[in-house]
Every structure is written in C-alpha cells, then in structure tokens.
Amino acid sequence: SKVSDKPYTSSEKVELLDKVKSLAPWISQLGVPVIVKPHPMTTKASVLKWMDWGALPDGWRWHDGEIYQALEATWCAVSLSTSSIVDAVLAKCVPCLLTCAQNVSFNSLDFLANQFPILQSISDDQIQVRLEEIFISRREFFQSETFKVREYLTLGLNPINDRTMAAFE
C-alpha cells in the first residue's frame, strides 16, 4: 500500500483505489463495471502513476463528466470520506463507505449511521464481503435500505420555491 501517514498528500486522492485494487480480478469476474471518477483536483495520469498502473484494470473505465452523470450510470457507490455520498444516495446508489487509513472516517451521512447501519464505514478486510452482499447475497436488502435513507433525506429537504429561496437573498 502506498498510502502515506502524512496528512494531505497525494495518496489521499487514490486511497480508495488503493483499498480495492487487490479486488480488481474478483470484481471483473463478477462482471460489475467500475466507473472511476477522480477527484476534481486529480488528473488521470497522476492516479495511474500513484497506483503504478499503466491503465485501469479490465472492466474499469474513467468518467470525465460531472458526478451526477456518473451516479446516473451506476448502482453502487464505493466512497471514502466524502460529502458526495449524499449525492449518491439521492441518485439511488447503494453506498459502500470505507474507513480511511487513519481509521478516521468522515462521510456526510455519518450522523445517520446508527439509524441506517448501511451507512457505517467498513474496514479494508470487510470490503469484499460487503460488495458480495451488495451485488449478490443481500442485493434487495441494500437497495431497500438505500431507498429508506433517500426517503429520510428527501423528507428533510425543503422544496424550492419563492419562500424557501428568499432565505438566500
């Protein structure tokens, strides 16, 4: 693993890929396409260099567009310390949240993890089991729970109208 224990190095930009790279052959066998959406401040070349890859593994592809476009094209979002997990759940993507190398996790839905256990971050040794559950053995459960989280979030969102938008004037 090339993940540095120094904070805010370029390794954080690829930590998620570093955590799942050993699973690439297994993921390819599942036939699950993988969409890689780099952090906006990261280039594809720097990701490949840091991972010591000439190209992405078989069945994996880059996404150059906006995050919402990537989320429309996927069923599960594997993420690490991000606020984009809210976008993923609102887009009906099953979340798979990983724990950072420093065992500190910050995902914008952590405050709901006790109420919705699928939002609890998992350790590296649980990744394959969780993905197997999400894609094979407990697919319906994870989809149902994701919809419950989405419903909770959407009920808490104010509608966009003249009255609610006036708060920003």
Image (cartoon, rainbow, N blue to C red):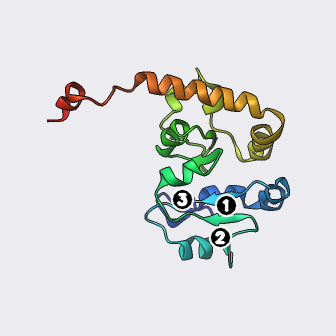
Three-letter residue code for mark 1: Asp
Secondary element under disc 1, as helix, strand or loop, is helix
Q: Nearer the viewer, residue 86 or 159?
A: 159
In the picture, measured across the screen, residue 121 lies left or right of residue 13, that is right
Q: Specify whether 9 is left or right of 138.
A: left
Q: Earlier in the sequence, mark 2 or mark 1?
A: 1
Which picture quadrant has residue 143? top right
Q: Residue at x 82, y 61 (%)?
A: 25
Q: Dot 2 lies on which element? A: helix
Q: Describe residue 166's horizontal placement relative to residue 100 as left or right.
A: left
Where 152 sits versus 130, above or below?
A: above
Image quadrant in which the C terminus is located: top left
Q: Amino acid at mark 3?
A: Glu
Residue found farthest to the left:
169
Residue 114: quarter of image: top right
The answer for how far apart the CA atoms under marks 3 and 1 are is: 10 Å
Quarter of the image for residue 121 reads: top right
- Tell which residue pokes out farthest to the front in this image: 161
Residue 160 placed where, x, y %?
30, 31
The CA distance from mark 2 to mark 1 is: 7 Å
The disc label shown at residue 12, or none: 3
Name the residue furthest bottom: 54
Q: CB under 8 Å between callouts 3 and 2?
A: no
Residue tagged 1? 18
Residue occupied by mark 2: 51
Label 3 CA crowd tier, 10 Å (few <14, some 14–19, many 20+): many
Per the image, label 3 sits on a secondary structure element best described as helix
Q: CA distance from mark 3 to mark 2?
A: 12 Å
Q: Is residue 70 above or below residue 83?
A: below
